[in-house]
Amino acid sequence: QFILYTLKNEQQTTKMSEPKRKLTIGVLALQGAFEEHEHILRTLGCDTIQVKMPAQLNQIDGIIFPGGESTAMGLIGTHNGIWTELQ
């Protein structure tokens, strides 16, 4: 299981001959099976980034929150400030 949130609401207008831009999806890499999620996203044609710090959020089009132990993820995310940036 996972949750995908989109961070940017952008419309793309492209001509048929123009290649579409690949999506860059961040995978919250605080805890959980983030490497497995990255593998699946790559097989679907997405670029991926392991998101560990708030500054990385401006590099992605969406984010996946892998399942994990919520208490540990909460403590780590509060400590590094990523939960504040995601709000």
Image (tube, grey):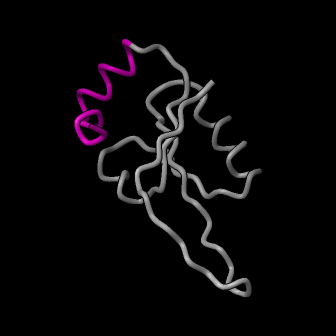
Which residue is painted at 61% across and 58% down in the image? Answer: 47
As drawn, is 79 to the left or to the right of 62? left
Question: Residue reaching furthest right?
Answer: 43
Q: Foreground: 86 or 11?
A: 11
Q: In which quarter of the image is residue 82?
A: top left
Query: Which residue is at the front of the view, 38 or 86?
Result: 86
- Does the magenta segment cover residue 33? no
Left or right? Give the position of 69 relative to 39: left
For this view, does 79 lie left or right of residue 10? left
Please determine whether, in this image, residue 71 is positioned above or below residue 51.
Answer: above
Q: Position of residue 44 (x, y in %)?
A: 74, 52
Residue at 33% across, 44% down: 53
Query: In the image, is residue 84 part of the stretch drawn in magenta?
Result: yes
Please tell me whether the stretch drawn in magenta is mainly helix, strand or loop.
helix
Residue at 55% across, 28% down: 66
Provide residue 83's location: percent of width, then percent of height. Answer: 28, 33
- Residue 39, percent across and down? 70, 43
Residue 85, image x, y percentages: 25, 42
Q: In this view, does 62 lie above or below 45?
A: above
Q: In which quarter of the image is residue 45?
A: bottom right
Query: Which one is in front, 22 or 55?
Result: 22
Span shown in magenta? 71-87
Instruction: Residue 9: name its quadrant.
Output: bottom left
Position of residue 69 relative to residue 82, above or below, is above
Quadrant of the image containing the C terminus: top left
Q: Which of 34 and 4 is in front in this view?
A: 4
Rendered-image quadrant of the N terminus = top right
User: How many numbered tags mark residues here?
Assistant: 0
Name which residue lies at 39% across and 41% down. 52
